[in-house]
Amino acid sequence: MQIYVGNLPWTTTEEELREFFKDYKILGPAKVIRDHSTGRSKGYGFVEVQEGIKAIEDTDGKELKGRPLRVNKAVRKAQVTNEGA
């Protein structure tokens, strides 16, 4: 399951994000979303883990570097279509 991790500290690296979720059997890369122009973190990221429900229950509200995380199941954005354009 891919999970969304919000309210990340700006300095969080992808390796730190992986380390934070290592107990939930990470299946893919951890990704901290960055601004294309500045390279600065946008304060959220994604991690794919085998034990997604448990990871959400255990880590939502838990602090990382002094900030309480918001952890939810990741939801894909609806694709925008240009019908009628």
Image (cartoon, helix red, strand yellow):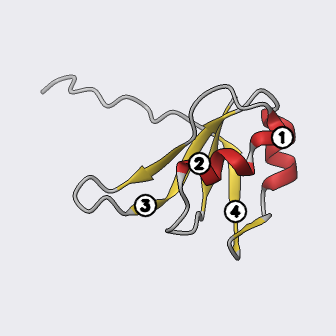
Q: Position of residue 9 (x, y in %)?
A: 57, 69
CA distance separating discs 3 and 1 = 24 Å
Up/down of 56 relative to 63, above or below: above
Q: Position of residue 82 (x, y in %)?
A: 21, 27
Please name the amino acid that badge 1 sits on.
Asp
Residue pictured at 68% horizontal, 72% vertical: 65
* Residue 50 horizontal side relative to residue 28, left or right: right
Q: Secondary structure at mark 4?
A: loop
Say which mark, if any, is on residue 41: 3
* Residue 21 horizontal side relative to residue 83, left or right: right
Please name the amino acid that badge 2 sits on.
Glu
* Residue 43 horizontal side relative to residue 47, left or right: left
Residue found farthest to the bottom: 66
Say which mark, if any, is on residue 69: 4
CA distance separating discs 3 and 4 = 15 Å
Instruction: Mark 1 vs mark 4: give the one in front.
Output: 1
Say which mark, if any, is on residue 15: 2
Say which mark, if any, is on residue 23: 1
- First of labels 3, 1 by sequence position: 1
- First of labels 4, 2 by sequence position: 2
